[in-house]
Image (cartoon, rainbow, N blue to C red):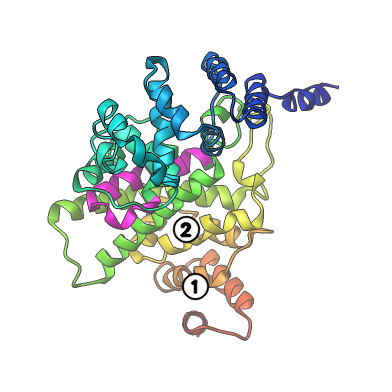
Amino acid sequence: MGDSTKSQQKTVPIPEQVLFKRILHELKVNPNDDEIKFACLIILSKLEKLTLKKQQKTEFYSLFTTHFIIRMLNTPEYETLATDMLEQVKQLTPDELKPYEAVILEKIPDFFQPIIQKLESKPVELLNHLLESEKRQNLTETGLKTLENLFREKNSNRKIFKKIFKVATIYLDSLSFETLCALSTRASLELRFWIELGVHEKSNADLLEYCDLLNAITILDKMSSELEHIELDETYEISDENLEIALSVSKFMNESCLVVVQEFAEIDTRNFTDEKLDEMGGSVVGQFTGLMRQPFLKYIARFYSLGMHVDFAVSKQASFDKHILEMVNSEGSGINFEWFMPLACDLQENHDSKFTIELGEFLMKKAGNECSELASYLESLMIEKIN
């Protein structure tokens, strides 16, 4: 009965959205009636709780002629809305604005200036614009600096970071090393929070969505690439200050990653007891399909392909090798076992234990007859241990 009621509540249409659809209908059936248009604008202005998606705005704006929008521009209460509408016309059908250039410039002197340039010193507005554009745009030097300052802001809330993670993935190759380090620290923190806290009733509203965490993984993967260069590439140039920052970020990422590894290792065997935090207690990993787990597992495998990360993990968590074995042996993990060959070789070579041997045997079994060079090397290490 209770579940049925909840289900019915979820399907109830939002009144503001219903009214918005009615407004669209009236505009479509009365395309030449200016009085209807103004009436619809008045009704829309009263819907304070209405939030329109980009597609809805595009559809709504397209129902007004450029001539009518110019009339709105000269009406103070509609000036802001008219400016937004004209921005869309400029993007989609710019030639329609030519007869009205003088009028527009009189009201909005910088209107024909590129939007990126207009927003280059307005961090949140710039972020929102880049998010809506959904493709890479050429930032000015000032715009990139504004964006980087926002990315390094420590006090931003999760609502902002959802947007930051998305936009950051588009401009990763343009960001400074310091900004990448700051982003990686926050991305690692959010990943740990999201995985460790799980789906608890009291925290559910604060969690990022799965797609947001995929963006965080992209950032962490880029940072892992930089750490690989630092450790393995002798020609890689880095200042002492940045090296210290990188090692600090590496340590923080490792501590967070250990928590993620443990969650993935134990999710299929953990039995929740009366000690759980609340009725909705449980790791969010339990909701993942094998396909959904893959990006996390691939990131973990790459991060621990570096010897310095493995050394830290083993010293920090005695059960690290056991957790790795349980994680790769987890049912429905969707794992590519080749990803974990470098880690298995490192453990076999430098951190001998019962679970290390079992991990090597398990991966060799999964590799089958089609052995890669790493699989062959792992096999030779195991034979050497036996002999």
The percent position of residue 158, horizontal first and vertical second, equals 43, 32
What kind of element bears circle 1?
Answer: helix
Main secondary structure type of the part rendered in magenta: helix
Q: Is residue 188 magenta?
A: yes
Instruction: Answer above or below: position of 334 versus 53.
Output: below
Tell me the residue that label 2 is attached to.
Answer: 300
Mark 2 → mark 1, Cα distance in angstroms: 12 Å
Sequence order check, earlier mark of 2 and 1: 2
The percent position of residue 346, horizontal first and vertical second, equals 42, 70
Instruction: Answer above or below: position of 229 versus 201.
Output: below
Does the rendering let one see residue 159? no
Tell me the number on the disc at residue 341: 1
User: What is the tally of numbered marks visible in this picture?
Assistant: 2
Q: Quarter holding the N terminus? A: top right
Q: Nearer the viewer, residue 377 or 295?
A: 295
Instruction: Answer above or below: position of 316 versus 23.
Output: below
The percent position of residue 113, horizontal first and vertical second, equals 26, 41
Tell me the number on the disc at residue 110: none
Residue located at (55% from left, 22% from top): 34
What kind of element bears circle 2?
Answer: helix
Label 2, residues with CA under 10 Å away: few <14, some 14-19, many ≥20: many
The percent position of residue 95, horizontal first and vertical second, equals 39, 46
Residue located at (38% from left, 29% from top): 83
Residue located at (24% from left, 53% from top): 177
**Boundaries of the magenta span:** 169-194
Does the rendering let one see residue 274? yes
Q: Nearer the viewer, residue 89 or 208?
A: 89
Q: Is residue 265 left or right of residue 65?
A: right
Q: Is residue 134 left or right of residue 19?
A: left
